[in-house]
Image (cartoon, rainbow, N blue to C red):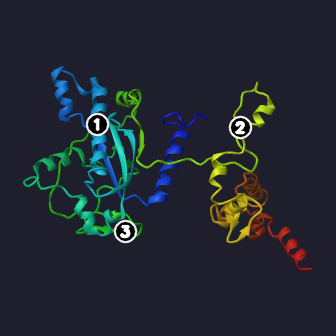
């Protein structure tokens, strides 16, 4: 398995995902989702390219460097200059479009006094409507060129967003006279039927490849993930099973007598909850195993999931295949309380024979 230090590997992604979830656990749900994409038509890029009669694809390093400078400037405006209010934390990840240009996905956690509790607050910061070309010509040009989805649907069924005849991005979005918040907490932005429209030309960007910009980003050692809040990983171990690193030629007595033995980060952290038994205590009850304590806290998969899985499978298989499924669940170690699952599904697993015997033995 590739270590987590390898950029883009499974463990690398898992580590950053867990760091992001730790941030969410501390600050709550993020408040703003912001994207920024490299534009090869930026004047900082075109000035240099025009001077040497080059195209953007000739100098991916210029595109990457300018994008990184603008990204850092945006982060500074949001966090230090507080353009959208006081920011408690910010995370972003770098991706690369199918055209190969760098693209950042960013989430912001706003301080309690800067959140957007009402739809009026949302409308002050976010607009999903086409700007008026007479009043805001520059903004209209930017939106028309960079921020309009499609064309897709019946006019372009081969668009990458199309699956089974429908747009996977749910376009076109329905009109709405005012901003609303749905039952899941997601905003439905104001999008009034004011007659404004933008004509888009069909283009083809269906291919995916490792672009020159992506390779340049790695060569320049720019971060593909960023977070403003530090996250400390707490390593843990069972009693008396600390991890010890030593050279195979080191004497055993010397290794055992090291001062670092018995002084780990996890043991130091436990000086606040006092002991292993404290970790296994839930509502005043000391459980014999850590897994029992986790189950009591509701941290593990509920046994009802396995009961429902067996009941659903019983519509397709009976007898021995169903019992094999139950055995596989036990062997995999996923079921914390196999007896409870058996009691709830014994009629299906044993086809009503063994279950009746069990009931007789319980009630002689």
Q: Are marks 1 and 3 in contact (CB under 8 Å)?
A: no
The residue to which callout 3 is attached is 182
- Residue 167 in sight from this viewpoint: no
- Name the element at disc 3: loop
x and y percentages locating residue 236 in the rendered image? 66, 49
Horizontal arrangement in the rendering, residue 253 relative to residue 40 (left or right): right
- Front-lying residue, 110 or 271: 271
Q: Are marks 1 and 2 in contact (CB under 8 Å)?
A: no
The dot on residue 335 is none
- Name the element at disc 1: helix
Residue at mark 1 to residue at mark 2: CA–CA distance = 43 Å
Residue at mark 1 to residue at mark 3: CA–CA distance = 37 Å
Q: Is residue 37 above or below residue 109?
A: above
Residue farthest top in this picture:
52
Q: Which residue occupies 27% across, 33% down?
A: 66
The residue to which callout 1 is attached is 69
Q: Are marks 2 and 3 in contact (CB under 8 Å)?
A: no
**Quadrant of res 270:** bottom right
Residue at mark 2 to residue at mark 3: CA–CA distance = 52 Å
x and y percentages locating residue 140 in the rendered image? 15, 50
Packing grade of label 3 (10 A; few <14, some 14-19, many >=20) is few
For marks 2 and 3, the one nearer the N-term is 3
Between disc 1 and disc 2, the foreground one is: 2
For marks 1 and 2, the one nearer the N-term is 1
Horizontal arrangement in the rendering, residue 109 relative to residue 196 (left or right): right
x and y percentages locating residue 344 in the rendered image? 74, 70
Q: Which residue occupies 72% across, 41% down?
A: 261
């Amino acid at each position: 398995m590739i270590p987590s230090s390898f950029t883009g590997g499974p463990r690398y992604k898992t580590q950053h995902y867990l760091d992001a979830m730790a941030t969410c656990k501390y600050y709550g749900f993020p408040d703003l989702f912001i994207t920024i994409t490299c534009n090869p038509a930026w004047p900082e890029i075109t000035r240099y390219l025009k001077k040497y009669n080059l195209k953007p694809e000739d100098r991916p390093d210029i595109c990457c460097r300018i994008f990184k400078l603008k990204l850092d400037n945006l982060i500074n405006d949001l966090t230090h200059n507080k353009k959208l209010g006081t920011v408690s934390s910010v995370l972003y990840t770098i991706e690369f479009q199918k055209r190969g240009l760098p693209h950042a996905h960013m989430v912001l956690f706003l301080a309690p006094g800067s959140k957007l509790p009402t739809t009026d607050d949302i409308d002050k910061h976010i607009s999903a409507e086409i700007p008026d070309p007479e009043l805001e010509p520059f903004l209209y040009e930017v939106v028309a060129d960079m921020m309009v989805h499609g064309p897709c649907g019946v006019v372009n069924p081969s668009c990458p967003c199309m699956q089974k005849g429908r747009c996977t991005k749910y376009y076109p979005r329905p009109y709405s006279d005012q901003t609303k918040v749905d039952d899941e907490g997601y905003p439905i932005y104001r999008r009034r039927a004011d007659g404004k429209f933008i004509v888009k030309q069909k283009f083809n960007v269906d291919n995916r490849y490792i672009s020159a910009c992506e390779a340049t980003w790695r060569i320049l050692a720019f971060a593909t993930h960023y977070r403003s809040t530090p996250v400390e990983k707490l390593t843990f171990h069972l009693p008396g099973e600390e991890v010890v690193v030593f050279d195979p030629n080191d004497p055993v007595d010397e290794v055992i007598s090291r001062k670092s033995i018995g002084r780990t980060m996890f043991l130091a952290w436990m000086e606040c909850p006092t002991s292993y038994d404290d970790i296994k205590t839930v509502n005043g009850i000391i459980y014999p195993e850590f897994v029992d304590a986790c189950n009591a806290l509701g941290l593990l998969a509920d046994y009802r999931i396995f009961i429902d899985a067996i009941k659903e499978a019983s519509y397709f298989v009976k007898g021995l295949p169903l019992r094999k499924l139950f055995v596989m669940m036990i062997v995999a170690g996923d079921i914390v309380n196999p007896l409870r699952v058996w009691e709830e599904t014994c009629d299906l697993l044993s086809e009503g024979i063994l279950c009746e015997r069990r009931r007789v033995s319980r009630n002689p």
